[in-house]
Image: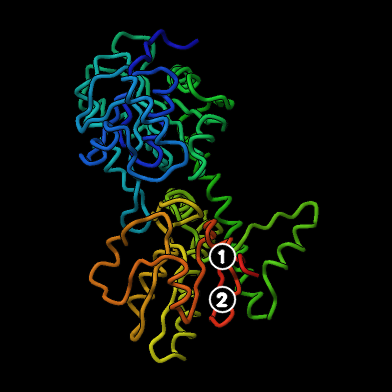
């Protein structure tokens, strides 16, 4: 049975690609939601009913919830019945998880607590991170406890997101969720909160298993993508069309090979497997090897482009797509962006025309480089000697291939086969 704890006011700490949609669906479900973000420009945008990034359907929900007074944003952590921590978990050292953002969120929450609150870690993190967050808070507030059913109890839980950028507003509501509490009561309370907006099945477990489950899902995909990427390298050396090869192999009833590409990006598949590796380096050899295969793919693509460019006096390269996946503006851990940056840096004579339909300015990694510009698709292809396709955005799918007839084309997605 769930503890008798109110869950009317929720504070979401971190209003990024997961935090803001989470805040929006909770507000849409009738909760009073106060979002917290360190960037004042993000806070101002949200309070004006706007969103600071592209995500289908998000701005409509945010604008509606702000107008109804159900959603607001600020830079300071407020008092609330429940807290959802959705902050970055980057790397440090040898791909170890940097938990400093979680620690900072915990330090901001601790002074606001009186007992009875639910604190949910939604950030993807290695096993033990939820316990670590609890330890930080309880060290600051030793008069409180994580033991259930007391006046001074706090309820700690982990509920990893498992949504696809571009479909977040759909999948956040429809997908099953794994919920892992430090206690059974914390998991039940977390389930009660998420049941307010989630139509998927809410699966209860302990926190460490929930943490590991999210990492396992993405490591599974990473290993399979590594197989496809390695296959693409071998197939090319053998003069075989890898996409036809995979299509044929997938006719086997128990074979489902994924698609190769220029690498693996985003803040999930490109990151999460390393958290498993760092937790047990001795026994994670396959997962580590898959990461190495996928991380090496951008350099192979780059070498292919440079080999073509070396044959031209002053080559112009159209780099199509620098987001980490199709039809979004998210550049985190994007191999396509890394390829474009490295190409700009290593192209001694020539120009790189970056085509990314979902951004208005080039990211900071291109600052100071004089041989790169953001261009539209038609202009870039017309001017280019080499066309490098790295992301299968919808505008690229519909492009008139007759315009590619006189170009060197390097298609890393098999879009123009």
Q: Residue at x 41, y 80 (%)?
A: 316
Residue 17 visible here? yes
Quadrant for residue 335, please give it. bottom left
Categorize mark 1 by other alpha carbons within 10 Å: few (<14), some (14-19), many (20+). Answer: few
**Residue 27 spot, x, y in % from top left:** 39, 23
| Coloration mode | rainbow
**Does residue 191 sit above or below 394 in this rendering?**
above
Residue placed under numbered mark 2 in the picture: 404
**Residue 123 spot, x, y in % from top left:** 39, 38
**Does residue 157 sit above or below 51 in this rendering?**
above
Cα–Cα gap, marks 1 and 2? 9 Å
**Does residue 54 sit above or below 322 in this rendering?**
above
**Does residue 220 sit above or below 17 in this rendering?**
below
Tell whether label 2 touches label 1 (CB within 8 Å).
Answer: yes
Q: Is residue 31 left or right of residue 262?
A: left
Residue 136 visible here? no
Q: In the image shown, does 87 or 45 lie closer to the viewer? A: 45
Q: Does label 1 or label 2 sit earlier along the sequence?
A: 1
Label 2: element kind:
helix
Q: Which mark is residue 73?
A: none
Q: In the image shown, does 320 or 151 lie closer to the viewer? A: 320
Q: Which mark is residue 399?
A: 1
Q: Residue at x 71, y 54 (%)?
A: 256
Specify the quadrant that holds the C terminus: bottom right
Q: Residue at x 34, y 20 (%)?
A: 68
Q: Residue at x 28, y 26 (%)?
A: 72
Q: In the image shown, does 414 or 357 lie closer to the viewer? A: 357
Label 1: element kind:
loop
**Residue 112 spot, x, y in % from top left:** 21, 21
């Amino acid at each position: 049975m769930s503890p008798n704890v109110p869950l009317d006011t929720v504070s979401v700490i971190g209003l990024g690609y997961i935090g803001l949609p989470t805040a929006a669906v909770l507000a849409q479900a009738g909760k009073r939601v106060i979002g917290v973000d360190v960037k004042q420009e993000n806070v101002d945008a949200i309070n004006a009913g706007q969103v600071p990034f592209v995500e289908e359907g998000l701005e409509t929900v945010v604008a509606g919830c702000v107008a109804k007074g159900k959603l607001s944003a600020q830079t300071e952590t407020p008092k609330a019945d429940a807290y959802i921590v959705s902050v970055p978990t980057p790397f440090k050292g040898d791909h170890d998880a940097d938990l400093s953002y979680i620690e900072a969120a915990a330090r901001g929450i601790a002074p606001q607590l009186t007992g009875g609150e639910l604190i949910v870690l939604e950030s993807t993190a290695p096993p033990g991170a939820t316990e670590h967050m609890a330890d930080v808070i309880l060290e600051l507030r030793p008069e409180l406890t994580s033991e259930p059913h007391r006046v001074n109890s706090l309820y700690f839980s982990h509920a990893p997101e498992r949504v696809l950028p571009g479909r977040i507003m759909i999948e956040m509501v429809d997908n099953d969720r794994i919920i892992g509490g430090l206690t059974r009561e914390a998991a039940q309370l977390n389930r009660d909160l998420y049941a307010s907006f989630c139509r998927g099945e809410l699966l209860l477990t302990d926190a460490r298993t929930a943490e590991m489950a999210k990492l396992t899902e993405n490591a599974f995909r990473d290993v399979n993508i590594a197989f496809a990427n390695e296959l693409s390298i071998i197939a090319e050396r053998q003069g075989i069309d890898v996409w036809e090869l995979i299509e044929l192999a997938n006719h086997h009833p128990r074979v489902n090979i994924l698609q190769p590409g220029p690498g693996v990006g985003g803040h999930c598949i490109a990151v999460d497997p390393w958290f498993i590796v760092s937790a047990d380096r001795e026994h994670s050899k396959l997962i580590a090897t898959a990461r190495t295969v996928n991380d090496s793919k951008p350099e192979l693509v780059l070498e292919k482009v440079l080999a073509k460019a070396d044959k031209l006096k002053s080559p112009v390269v159209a780099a199509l797509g620098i987001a980490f996946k199709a039809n979004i503006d998210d550049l985190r851990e994007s191999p396509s962006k890394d390829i474009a940056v490295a190409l700009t840096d290593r192209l001694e004579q020539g120009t790189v025309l970056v085509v990314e339909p979902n951004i208005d300015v080039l990211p900071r990694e291109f600052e100071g480089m004089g041989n790169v510009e953001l261009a539209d698709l038609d202009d870039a292809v017309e001017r280019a000697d080499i066309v490098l396709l790295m992301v299968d955005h919808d505008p690229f799918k519909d492009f008139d291939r007759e315009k590619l007839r006189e170009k060197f084309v390097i298609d890393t997605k098999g879009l123009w086969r």
